[in-house]
Amino acid sequence: MTTLPDYEPPADENALLLKWIRRARESQMSHYDMADRLSARERRIGWLVTVLSAFVGTAVFASLSTPPLSIGMRIFVGLVSVTAAVSAALQTFLRYAGRAEKHRAAGARYGAVRRRLEAVFAGDADARDAHYLASIRIELDRLAEDSPNVPPRVFYRTQRALLADKARGRDA
């Protein structure tokens, strides 16, 4: 049997629990990070749509009461109008707010599993039943299947941030 050079399978139950705690923590933080990123994108594109729409509306209103706009200005207002419409369509199509909420919910669920794992690791008798490892494994597997994908670059950045926090003596 060969194993990957970086991978050491857990040698005992405590090592397994620690590995699961670390993975749940990384997943929790990655999902929260992804939710924050998607929410920020939603706000940025929302501001863009609002500003562009306000500009187009003002320009159209202003054109009603003044002499006709130059052809260059009409083309510019038309382009801004198209940009506003495309931005609004992208905002709807990309569903940043809905995706952010799914990541936030996944982060919360990973946090709940992590707290359960930490209670088991700490020796809480109420957290250990006859099949606690199997039930936690099933829960982690279901979470992995149901959760939205976190891009690898976000996940790796989260891992680096958690390692840096650990090196500074802070633990999330």
Image (cartoon, rainbow, N blue to C red):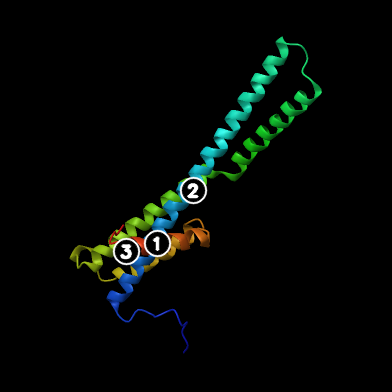
Question: What amino acid type should be assigned to the residue bearing mark 2?
Answer: Arg
SS class, disc 1:
helix
Q: Earlier in the sequence, mark 3 or mark 1?
A: 1
User: In x, y percent, where is residue 64?
Assistant: 72, 12
Q: Position of residue 76 (x, y in %)?
A: 74, 28
Helix, strand or loop at disc 3? helix
- Across the whole image, how many numbered discs are drawn on residues? 3
* Within-10-Å neighbours for mark 1: few <14, some 14–19, many 20+: many
What residue is shown with label 2?
Answer: 37
The label number, if any, that marks residue 26 in the structure image = 1
Alpha-carbon distance for marks 3 and 1? 13 Å
Left of 141 or right of it: where is 132? left
Is any part of residue 105 visible from this angle? yes
Left or right placement of residue 115 versus residue 4 in this view: left
Q: Amino acid at mark 3?
A: Lys
Rendered view: 21 above or below 73: below
